[in-house]
Every structure is written in structure tokens, then in C-alpha cells.
Amino acid sequence: MTPVLLGNLGVSLALAFSLLGLALSLLAYSQGDGRFLKGAKALVLPTFLAALAAFLTLEWALLTHDFSVAYVARNHSAQDPLWVTLVTPWAALEGSILLWGLLQTLYTLLASRKSVDPWRASLVLAVLFGIQVFFFGVMATIASPFQTLPNPPADGNGPNPLLQNHWMMAVHPVLMYLGFVGLSVPFAYAVAAMVVRRYQTWVGETRWWTLIAWGFLTAGKVAGMWWSYEVLGWGGYWAWDPVENASFIPWLLSTAFLHTAIVQETRGAFKAWNFAFVTLAFAATVLGTFLTRSGVIQSVHAFAEGPVGPAFLGFFLLVTGLGLGLLSRVSREVRDTVVFRLLSREGALLLGAFFFAGWALVVVLGTFYPLLVEAFTGAKVSVGAPFFNQVSAPIGVGILLLMGVGPILPWRRPRAEVFRNLYMLLAVLLLGTLLGLLRGYTFGASLAVGLFLYNTAAILLLVREGVLARLRAGLSPWGFLENRRRVGSLLVHFAVALMGLGIAFSQTYRLESEKTLYRGQAWEVGGLRLTFQGVRALDEGRRFAVEALLETERFGEVRPRLHFYPQMNAPLPAPKVVYTPGNDYYFLLMDFDREKGEWASIRLIVTPLVFWMWVAGGLMALGTLYILWPAPRREEVRGVSPA
Ligand code: HEM
């Protein structure tokens, strides 16, 4: 059987099973007949296997250089190294949709194992099968990964060289998709909860899924920032370009949901917010895919040229309409009747969620405004980084402020001793900021120091209180570590404060210098002395590399490169970054003497504290893993509530 036949068979079977699963789950719900639900559940594994077969077939076509498959011809070359070939399924549109579909079937498989009452189980399955119908439907009709070419070329171009330039390509997109797709599970539960009008339990039941999805999204975002830093050669990690924004929006909304869900779990409040946030977070993943995959970013007219853009836009509207439509139907029943104090944990959590949602709205507006203007007037306008930075800075400060006090404040109303803690934290914030100012930092950087110390102090206070409470009760202080949510979230919060510090300093203090050096010439810049020793050329098969040999006193030999890919006119920079806890040294080869290798233009970018942003990314992942790790059986101790 050829890959085309097998791949198409996999996609068609996955679509057929999903359609059948959808019909059976809806029947199970409407007829109240358990046999239909059993039938729907029985289809979950075959759907996954069909999707897996389709995905492996695409890998097979790539590994065997089957250029009769259009996707292989467009995105693969026989010269590609093995790892590039293996990750090529997600290098372009059709393969990415296949990966999405495969992961969706995997999540459906895992989610279907969880036992909830048959009514909701049928509806959850109906939503998840429905999402699969969309993805496999798109693959079966307008974006097939297995289209054939009548006249296959002898070799293809390979994926976009930018994607081949760094191993992060193997990791970053998969993490993002695992996060995107993961949000479908809490969304499905939310829909089921609204239909059957049982509003309370679903947030607790889906907490694991929410955290998994959020954890993958966070890891994917940080990995993407690092990829951008290492690969794109501009010495930055975030440019507010639409592709970055597209995945930032669901991250912000899911962070809002993560927090309001805690209030519903604990106090039974914020039900309406949770339905709204989970719908918008999942819908935003579809919107993000529309934005990055419809060609609309290059030009709004590209959107009209292919059917994929309109299909995704339609699906986005369907998801949003379903979630928000159901919410408006039940809005009277889920309305909060209790009035909240701002100075309470729930008050801080809700205000924080508004900050996240407001930020998401700003990013949506800034990203879509140029598209709307172009669509209606034809004029090209751009909303640049200065706009996003200006709006984001106060929102970021607000979030960092709330993050410190939120976990300190008790539920309902503050007790007297809490005020003492709050005053102390305020003093740390002011002193930290003053310290920064005295050291000559800008106000923004000084505030970042203050906020970092303030959040660290808040965390230490919470740890101290938790440990003291256990000691007072005659228990081992280590038992504090068993409260996984508390300890893990403190680690994540600390990481956020650390990242805030890294962002503030790296954005404020950045030294960039460029010089043309002749062989043997020395250059002193940013406290670093380097000598240019010449250039070296290397033929690496699929590309040609030129590296500058720079001898530094501090780091030994450093070799920034330029990569020449046959399919690109201009060379791609391959910067060399030397990470240190104080400053990052980012070396770039800009140009060189093509005849004798006697000179080279070198750019050096020295940026402080970027190193800590990647440490913070790792801590966030660690904190999330800690929360997710199965808890040991809790000691039931009256009066020792770490929360
Ligand atoms: C958990 C507050 C910002 C990630 C929590 C908890 C509170 C809280 C009170 C529950 C802790 C416990 O039960 O012991 C806030 C406030 C924020 C904020 C008021 C600012 C608006 C952030 C940010 C992130 C984050 C920016 C990550 C980027 C988390 C995570 C959890 C958590 C992962 C654990 C959730 C769970 O286990 O379900 N937060 N936080 N928080 N927070 Fe935050």
C-alpha cells in the first residue's frame, strides 16, 4: 500500500469514527441509553489508532523521500538530516493540522477513561468528537497532508531554513500544540456542565487537564522565546509579532481561568467567569491557528485565497458561540450572589483574572487592528512593539503586585495580623525600589527590583507561616511540602517574579555594538576583550557555513556563524550566545571578506539577566510538575490549614 493510500485511509477512518462517535454520544445523551455511550467510548481508541497511522504514514513518506506526496515535495529534501525529517510533519499547514488531530484523539482517549455520570460523559465525548470532526474534516477536504503531485520532482526544497536552524524546532511546536489541544478537555466539561445544569464539580474534575494544558502552553511559550533568542539573530526574545501574540492570548486567558477555578473549587463562586474564560481560552487557540495558518498576517487577501482561513474562522465562531451561547442561557443560575471584598483572596484572584483578560484584549486589539484596517481601507498600518510595551508594563506591574498579596490574603475577609504582613510587604517593595534608585537604575528597573523582593518576601512569609503552624501542632515541618498546590504555586510565582526582573533589566539595559575587524585586531566592548583570528568555511552538505574565530580572554574561542542555504538568497545568522548570570554575550557574524577572509564585521550585544529568564522558565515547569505529581496521603490535622 502506498503512503498516499494509507494516509488517506487513516484520515478518512478517523473522520468516520469521529462522526459516528459524535452521533452515538448525542444519542446517548438524548435517549439516556448507556449502550450508545458504550458504543461511543469503544470508538475512541480506533480513532486514535487511525490518526496515529496517518501521522506515521506521513513520517514514512518523508523518510522514504516520497516526492509524489505534495507535502513531502514542498517541505522536505533528501539532504535533510534525520532529525529535521522527523519534525517536518509540523513544519507546514497540513502536517500541523494532522498533529493537532492526532493529539486531539490522544486527549479524547485519556479523557474518556475518567468516570463521570453518563449524561455529562456523553456530552464531553460529543464535544471532543465534534472537535475531531472539524480537524479530520479539514484534512479530508481542503488541507490534505496526502495530496499527490502528477509530476513529482527529483528532490524538494526542505523546510524553511529558519526551522532547520535549531533543534528547538523539534520541541517548541509540539509543546504548544499539547497546550492548545489540552484546553479542549476543560472546555468540553464546561459545555457539558452548562447543558446538564450541574455547575460546580467540573472545575475540580478538570483541574488536572487545565494544569497540564497550561503547563505545556507555558513551557511552549518559554521555549519559543528562547528559540527566537538563539536563532533569529536580533538578541531579543519577544517582538510582539502576530505569531507570538497568537499563542500569548490563550496563555493569558488560561492563566485567568486557572485562578478563577481555584475560587469555584474552594468557595463555589465565579462560575460564570469560569465558563467564559475556559471558552475564550480554547476559542483563542483556534483563533491563533487561524491567524498563523491562514496567511492573513502576510496580507488579509491571502485569507480569501484559500479555504483554510475561513474554515478556522468559522470554527472559532462556532466554539465561541457554543460556550457563550450556553452561558447566556444559564446566566441567571450561575450568577454570584455573594458580594466579595477586594481585600480577600477571592478579590485578588478576580482582580488578577481581569488583569490577564484585559491584557488578552489589548493583545487581540493590537494584533487584529492592522488586519481590520487593511481589510476595510486597503491601507497598511502596523501596531508596533512600543504600543504593546507601553500598555503591558502597567498591567505587568499590577499582576506582580497582586501575585504577592493574593496567597497571603485569607478567604472572605482579612484578619488583623494580615495587615501587619501587608505593611511589611509594602515596606519591602518601597525599600527595594529605593535601593534600585540609589544604585542608579531607572525607575522601571528599580521597581522591578522592588517587586521581585516584595514577591520573594511574600513567599517566605507564607512558608514561615505554614511551617510554624505545623510546628505548633507538633507535626514535622516537612509536611508543608505535601501541600502540592501551595508549594508548587509558590515556586511558579517566584519564577514569574524572577522573569519580571529579567524582562525589566534586559529591556532597559542593552548594549549593542558593531565593528569591522581585521585579522589579529583586538576590540574591547562591554567589558570584554576579543581578537579576530580569521574566518573558516565549512561545507555541511545541506548548507554552507562560515564562522568567525574570535579569541576572548574570558570565554576562550567563540565562533558565531552565517549559514548559507541553497534555497535562500540571504545567509541566516547563527549567533553564538555565552550565558552568564550577570550578562549574556551575544556574538553575531554580520559580514566577512569573501575573497581572503581578512576581515569580518562582528556585532556584540550585551544584555543583563536574560540567563535568569530561562532559569525562571525551568522553575515554572518544575513548579507545575510538582503540583501535578500525585500527592501522598494527606495528614488530617485540625487547625493546621496551610491554605
Ligand atoms: C495558584 C494568586 C499570578 C501561576 C495561585 C493561588 C493563588 C494565586 C491564591 C492558590 C495558591 C494556593 O492555593 O495555595 C495569584 C494572583 C496572581 C497570580 C493574585 C496575580 C494576579 C500568577 C501568574 C502565574 C501563576 C502570573 C504564572 C505565570 C499559578 C499556578 C497556580 C497558582 C500554576 C497553581 C494552580 C493550581 O494548583 O490549580 N495563584 N497568582 N499565578 N498560580 Fe497564581
Image: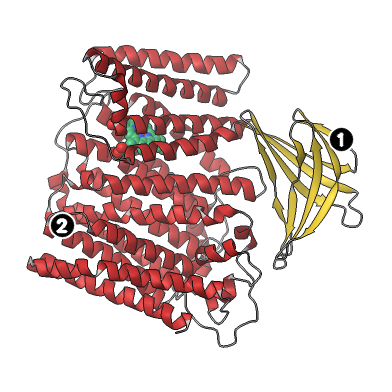
In the image, farthest residue toward the left: 32
Percent x, y for residue 412? 20, 25
Q: Residues within 10 Å of mark 2 (few under 14, many from 20)?
A: many
The reply to whether dot 2 and dot 1 touch (C-beta < 8 Å) is: no
- Please state which amino acid type lies under the numbered disc 2: Arg
Nearer to us in this view, 552 or 333: 552
Q: Is mark 1 within 8 Å of ligand 1?
A: no
Residue linked to disc 2: 120
- Please state which amino acid type lies under the numbered disc 1: Ala
Percent x, y for residue 19? 26, 74
Q: Which circle marks residue 522 in the picture?
A: 1
Nearer to us in this view, 598 or 322: 598
Whether residue 172 is situated above or below residue 122 in the rendered picture: above
Q: Residue at x 70, y 44 (%)?
A: 576
In the picture provided, is 224 more to the left or to the right than 513? left
Whether residue 610 is situated above or below residue 212 in the rendered picture: above
**Quadrant showing the N terminus:** bottom left
Percent x, y for residue 72? 55, 74
Whether residue 70 is situated above or below residue 619 in the rendered picture: below
Secondary structure of the residue carrying tag 2 is helix
Is residue 466 visible in the rendered image? The answer is: yes
Q: Residues within 10 Å of mark 1 (few under 14, many from 20)?
A: some
In the picture provided, is 257 more to the left or to the right than 237? left
Q: Residue at x 30, y 19 (%)?
A: 477
